[in-house]
Image: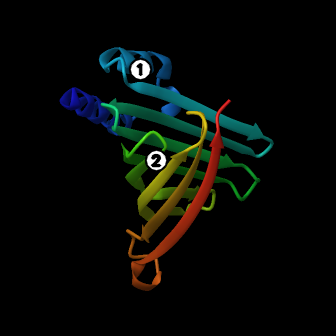
Amino acid sequence: MLFRSLRSLIAIFTIFFATQVSAAELNWQQTLQWLKQSLPQSTELDFNKKSIKFDGCHQRDYQLTFHQKFGDAISVDTQVGYVKGELSWGAHNQKTTTRQWAILPRYRLNHHVSLGLGYIRQMDTNLETSQGADIQLPASNQWLLSSRFMLDSEHQYVEVALSRALWQANDAGHTWAGQGRTDKHINLVYVANF
């Protein structure tokens, strides 16, 4: 079962990144249905498409999420995302695209506490302007240590997360000191699902 789930996870990443077709051109409903049929029944797979559009602005956000349990104590959450935005302000038009993926294995210590150690990779963000500039913004590699404390029900929890992200410039044109920067965060989150 573990091998089949890992094989399915690799298939998801391959489909998402190997294709040269833009996200808007893919038939996500058929692809998602095919993936759900080829995965084990215990697998949760979801695709979210968000879009906002108003005068001079259009942004689309695509997120494919995958959750697989391996027994009662271990689970793996993964996410693949693609964001595309366009600003149209006359002579100052901009287009930006970014991709990211994340994996977070989680170990359940007991019914109320679980620990996760994850990795988030955001690829170079591409920024194109109407003046002809094509800029590759730095990529980031983020490590995350998460503790989740379940409250009275499965629908409420508090999560404490420590993260460290390294932003690395891949282009010699970036003049950051040492070609990189590091962000460190402590996040405290309360979640209630209705």
Q: How far across and how far down the image is residue 108, in percent?
A: 38, 43
Disc number placed over residue 113 in the picture, else none: 2
Number of residues whose C-alpha sits closer than 10 Å to that of mark 2, classed few (under 14), some (14–19) or many (20 or more): some
Height in image: 189 above or below 49? below
Q: Is residue 92 left or right of residue 185?
A: right
Element at label 1: helix
Q: Amino acid at mark 1?
A: Thr
Q: Nearer the viewer, residue 39 or 115?
A: 115
Q: Is residue 131 left or right of residue 116?
A: right
Q: Nearer the viewer, residue 2 or 26?
A: 2
Asked whether residue 67 appears in the rendered view, the answer is yes
Label 1 vs 2, first from the N-terminus: 1
Q: How far across and how far down the image is residue 130, in percent?
A: 63, 57
Height in image: 82 above or below 142? above
The quarter of the displayed image where residue 14 is located = top left
Residue at 45% across, 85% down: 177
Element at label 2: strand
